[in-house]
Image (tube, rainbow, N blue to C red):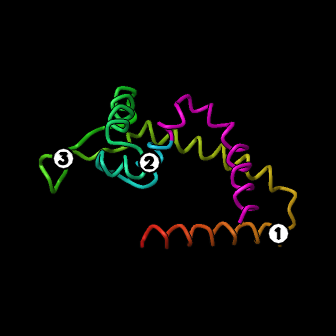
């Protein structure tokens, strides 16, 4: 397992370089990705997903709202709560960021033989399955 750990860290460092082009902090990009790719959340749900306190997430959300990345709406089931939604601007920024990271990965794996490329794709699918199973329990 140390090899997957090391590879994951190196891979993340390689693709994270292009994230600077989004012109938002890594913490904001991470929180926004939850909303953009995972859907609306309450502040508490977003804080839990990002493994930070609600106070920390509240500060991030306030800043992202000011920048036009997040909007708040009354919770449909609980009038005391609000749900946080990513704005179209946030979606555009995150989708461009994802495209840049995917381009880095494409370049990195471009010389792989088709069989090795399929192995990498299968390994990624297995990792996703493990993550989904562990979050469901």
* Residue neighbourhood size for the residue with mark 3, other residues' Cα within 10 Å, grouped as few (<14), some (14–19), many (≥20): some
Q: Quadrant of the N terminus?
A: bottom right
Image coords of residue 76 (percent x, y)? 17, 54
As drawn, the label of residue 36 is none
Q: Which residue is mark 1?
A: 116
Q: Secondary structure at mark 2?
A: helix
Image coords of residue 133 (percent x, y)? 49, 73
Q: Secondary structure at mark 1?
A: helix
Q: Which stretch appears magenta?
A: 1-29
* Residue neighbourhood size for the residue with mark 2, other residues' Cα within 10 Å, grouped as few (<14), some (14–19), many (≥20): some
Most prominent secondary structure in the magenta stretch? helix
How far apart are labels 1 and 3 at the CA level? 48 Å
User: Is there CB contact under 8 Å for labels 1 and 3?
Assistant: no
Confirm whether the magenta stretch covers residue 63: no
How far apart are labels 1 and 2 at the CA level? 33 Å
Q: Nearer the viewer, mark 1 or mark 3?
A: 3
Residue at the spot x=40%, y=48% of the render?
35
């Amino acid at each position: 397992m140390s090899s997957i750990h090391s590879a994951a860290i190196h891979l993340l460092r390689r693709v994270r370089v292009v994230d600077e082009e989004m012109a938002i902090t890594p913490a904001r990009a991470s929180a926004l990705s939850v909303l953009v790719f995972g859907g609306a959340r309450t502040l508490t749900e977003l804080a839990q997903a990002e493994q930070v306190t609600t106070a920390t997430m509240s500060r991030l959300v306030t800043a992202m709202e000011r920048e036009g990345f997040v909007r708040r709406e009354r919770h449909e089931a609980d009038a005391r709560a609000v749900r946080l939604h990513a704005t179209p601007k946030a979606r555009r920024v995150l989708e461009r960021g994802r495209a840049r990271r995917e381009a880095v990965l494409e370049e990195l794996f471009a010389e792989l033989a088709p069989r090795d490329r399929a192995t990498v794709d299968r390994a990624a699918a297995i990792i996703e399955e493990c993550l989904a199973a562990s979050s469901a329990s």
